[in-house]
Image (spheres, rainbow, N blue to C red):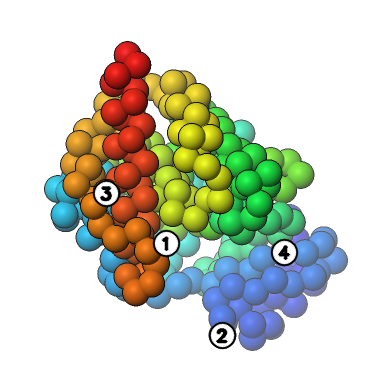
Amino acid sequence: MLSVESVQRIEMSPGWRRHRVEILDVAEGRVVVKGQRPPRSAARFWLMSSLARVVRHPLLRPVPAPGGAAAQATELRRLQALARSGVPVPAVLHQAPDFIVLSHVDGVPLSALLTDTPEVALPAFERGLRGLAQVHAAGQYLSQAFARNMLLSDPGVVYLDFEDDPLEVMSLADAQARDWLAYLLSALWCVNVPRAQVLQAWSEVQASISVEVRQRIGGAIERLAWLRHLPNRRDPWGRNIISLQALADFLTDWHSSHSVSS
């Protein structure tokens, strides 16, 4: 917890009011101050909502993110639930009506490592897979399970961004399947690793996924298959299109080889 002096210093700082998130050094150490965000624009979720519409699969739809006090309350609840389950997340150090204070985590975003050399990218991709499997084994889920929200640090993979709660609109199995699709969607288009090694890494981890969640992923693959024919070049199509193409191409390849081998 924070001292009265540290809280007063945070309250007086204009940074988190202006930019919403601010990193500060206080007597207890480095902290992250998060002010309340306004309701998120629907445009922010264009990729997931568009994907949900075109494949007609409900678990791909974005979860409502109300912003304001409701989003802050959701993040506090989710952080506390995840921490109780042993999932690595920032510690909640203080809460106020208009901001919360979290511990600062030293680490590198997983997304930054995926584009490094294959010797760096493959272990990073595998850690993302194994970490997500461990979250689900603890009976939990993430929602924003994108590589950018995963920090690789000394304790392992630390997870960020919990201002929405999928269980408000879907089952736990749906939320966990959605986590897998979100992670693969954010990682496959940019991971600098030969396809065979990525397929092997995914095959090893997916074997530990519950039957219920695998069935939901399988249902999504059938709807995604045609998207593999989208352009696979970033210019001029942009990252969203090649992300969809990479996800569909990868999962269709894996599903075909898995069906043959079984």
Q: Earlier in the sequence, mark 4 or mark 1?
A: 4
- Residue 95 disc label: none
Residue 82 in picture, x, y percent from top left: 54, 40
> Would residue 72 be visible to someone looking at this image?
yes
Q: Quadrant of residue 171?
A: top left
Element type at marker 3? Answer: helix
Q: CA distance from mark 2 to mark 1?
A: 18 Å
Q: CA distance from mark 3 to mark 4?
A: 43 Å
- Give whichever of 192, 133 is nearer the camera: 192
Q: Amino acid at mark 1?
A: Ala
Residue pointed to by mark 4:
31
Q: CA distance from mark 3 to mark 2?
A: 42 Å
Residue 161 in picture, x, y percent from top left: 50, 57
Q: Nearer the viewer, mark 3 or mark 2?
A: 3
- Give whichever of 169, 110 is nearer the camera: 110
Instruction: Confirm or deny contact between disc 1 and disc 3 (CB under 8 A).
Output: no
Residue pointed to by mark 1:
71
Q: Nearer the viewer, mark 1 or mark 3?
A: 3
Residue pointed to by mark 2:
18
Q: Earlier in the sequence, mark 1 or mark 3?
A: 1
Residue pointed to by mark 3:
228
User: Which residue lies at the image location 55% right of the left edge and 76% below the top edge?
Assistant: 20
116 vs 20, left or right, is: right
Q: Earlier in the sequence, mark 2 or mark 1?
A: 2
